[in-house]
Image: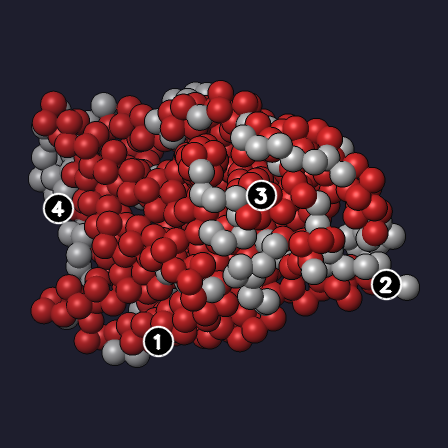
Amino acid sequence: MADDKNLKVLNALDMAKTQWYHFTAIIIAGMGFFTDAYDLFCISLVTKILGRIYYYVEGSPKPGSLPPNVSAAVNGVALCGTLAGQLFFGWLGDKMGRKKVYGLTLMVMCICSIGSGLSFGRDAKGVMATLCFFRFWLGFGIGGDYPLSATIMSEYANKKTRGAFIAAVFAMQGFGILGGGIFAMMLSAIFDAAFKSPPYEVDPAASTIPQADYLWRIVLMVGALPALLTFYWRLKMPETARYTALVAKDAKRAAADMAKVLQADIEAEQHKAEAMASRHKSYNLFSKEFLRRHGSHLLGTTSTWFLLDIAFYSQNLFQKDIFTAIGWIPPAKTMNAINEVYTIGRAQTLIALCSTVPGYWFTVALIDVIGRFTIQLGGFFFMTVFMFALAIPYDHWTQPEHRIGFVVMYSLTFFFANFGPNATTFVVPAEIFPARFRSTCHGISAASGKLGAIVGAFGFQLLAQSQDPKKVDAGYHPGIGVKNSLIALGVVNLLGLLFTFLLPEAKGKSLEDLSGENEEATD
C-alpha cells in the first residue's frame, strides 16, 4: 500500500479533515493572487488615459494614444518580468524552501506597485521609462507568486479537497480583476464629480484635466495594499512538511511543525524520510531519467498553459478594443479622459462579474468531483466552439441589434476559460512532479504560459488591425482583422484540447503517488 510507504506526517496531511489552517493558507496565498491579477490587468484600464495625457496632438480629430511600441512595452513588460520571476523563484523555491522565498516575492510586489505610480521627469519618455522599469520588476515579484503559492497550497492540502484549495487560491485572480474595474470606476466617478470637463470633440485640450495625471497613478499604486495586509502572515507560516521532510530531509522538524498545525502527535520517522529522499537522488531535472518519468507531463503542462494564455491574454488585455470595435464602448472623441476610464472599468467589471468570477468558482466547486482532466478538456472544447461562433458570423455580431449577443458569447469564452484550463493549468503542475522539482516545474509551466501571454498580447494587437489601411490605428500596419484573429484563437484552443491528453488525472491521489516518490527505485 502507498500509505505504508509514505511518511506518517504526509499521511496525516493527506487524510486531515478540512480545518481552519487550510482556510488561513487559502487567504494568505489568495491575497497574493488578488494582488497579482489587480496589478497585471489594471494597466488595461489606464493605457487610454496615458495616451491622452502624454501623446496629445493639437488639432488631431482623435484623442492622443500610445504609439505602438510604447503600448507594447507598457502592456507587455510586466508579462516579461513575470516570466523571468516564475523561472527564478520557482527554482529558488526548491533550493531554499518555499517559506523563505515567499515573503521576498510579496515585498518586491509592494515596492514596485508603489514605484509604478512614480515618475522620473515630466515628459512622456521619462514617465513611460519609469513605468516600464517598475512594471518589469513588479512582474518579477508576481512571477514568484505563481509556483510558490501553488506548491505551498498543494503541499498543505489533504488529498480529498486539494484541487479545490489550489483552485481557490487561483480564483482570487477573478476578484483582483473585478476589484481593479470597480476601483477604477469609483475613482473616476469621484474625479468626474470634482473636476468637470467637456468631451474631446467639444474641447480637445480641456477634455483631459491636469488632475487626470493623478488618477492613473493612484489606480496602479493601490495594488500594494492587499499584498501588504498579508505580509506578516506569510512570514509566520511554517515551511511545508513535504519540503522539510523530502527535500531538506528533516523529518523531526516536519513532524513538529505539522503537529502544531494539525494539533496532533505525529511520529518523526527520520530514517524513512532519508530513505525516501535518497531513492530518486540519482537523477536531476535535466536528465534522461527525469525525461522518462516526467517528460510527457512537463510537455503537457507547458504546452496547454502556453496555448491557453495566447487566447486568454489576447482577450483580456485587449477586451476594450473588442468592445470599441462592436460599439459597446463609445468612440473616444465623445468622452473626456475620466469618462473613458470609467467606461473601460465598467466593461471589465461586467465581464469579470458575469463570467470570470463565476467560472473560477465553478472550478473550485467541481474540480474534486469531476476531476482536472475533464474540466480542462471541456473548457478548451467550449472555448473553441464559442470562438468560432464569434468569428465565423462576425459581421452579424457587429450590427447594433446583435451587440448584446456578442458580449454574451464573448463572456461565455471567458467563463469556460476559467471553468476550464485557466484554473487547471495552475493546479496540475503543483501535483504531478516530485517535491524537489515541484516548484521549479510549476515555474517552467507558468513561464511557458506567460510566453503565450506575450504572444497573445503583442500578436493580437498586430493581427487584429483592420485589413483596410484607412481604418488601421496610428503607427500600425494592416492586419488580418478581428474576425480572422478570432478564428486563429479558435485553432489555438483546439490545439490546447489535444495536448490535454498528455496529462494524468490527479483527483484523490497523494502527491507522492502521483510523482512516483512512493515507488521503489528502479535499477
| Residue at numbered disc 2 | 522
Q: Residues within 10 Å of mark 3 (few under 14, many from 20)?
A: many
Between the residue at mark 3 and the residue at mark 2, the CA separation in whole angstroms equals 27 Å
| Residue at numbered disc 3 | 13
Q: Residue at x 57, y 48 (%)?
A: 14
Q: Residues within 10 Å of mark 4 (few under 14, many from 20)?
A: some
Question: Which amino acid type is shown beneath numbered disc 3?
Answer: Leu
Q: Tell me if residue 212 comes above or below residue 242 in the rendering.
A: above
Is residue 71 visible in the rendered image? The answer is no
| 303 displayed left or right of 287 | left
Q: Nearer the viewer, mark 4 or mark 1?
A: 1
Which badge, 3 or 2, comes first in the chain's sequence? 3
Which badge, 2 or 1, comes first in the chain's sequence? 1
Residue 191: which quarter of the image?
Answer: top left
Residue 385 is marked as: 1
Between the residue at mark 1 and the residue at mark 3, the CA separation in whole angstroms equals 40 Å
Question: Which amino acid type is shown beneath numbered disc 2?
Answer: Thr
Residue 380: which quarter of the image?
Answer: bottom left
Question: Which amino acid type is shown beneath numbered disc 1?
Answer: Val
Q: What secondary structure is marked by label 1?
A: helix
Q: CB of mark 2 within 8 Å of CB of mark 1?
A: no
Q: What secondary structure is marked by label 3?
A: helix
Q: What secondary structure is marked by label 4?
A: helix
Q: Residue at x 15, y 64 (%)?
A: 404
Check the image and name the residue furthest to the bottom: 392
Q: Nearer the viewer, mark 3 or mark 2?
A: 3
Between the residue at mark 4 and the residue at mark 1, the CA separation in whole angstroms equals 35 Å
Q: Residues within 10 Å of mark 1 (few under 14, many from 20)?
A: some
Q: Nearer the viewer, mark 3 or mark 4?
A: 3
Residue 32 is marked as: none
The x and y percentages for residue 267 are: 70, 36
Residue 334 is marked as: 4
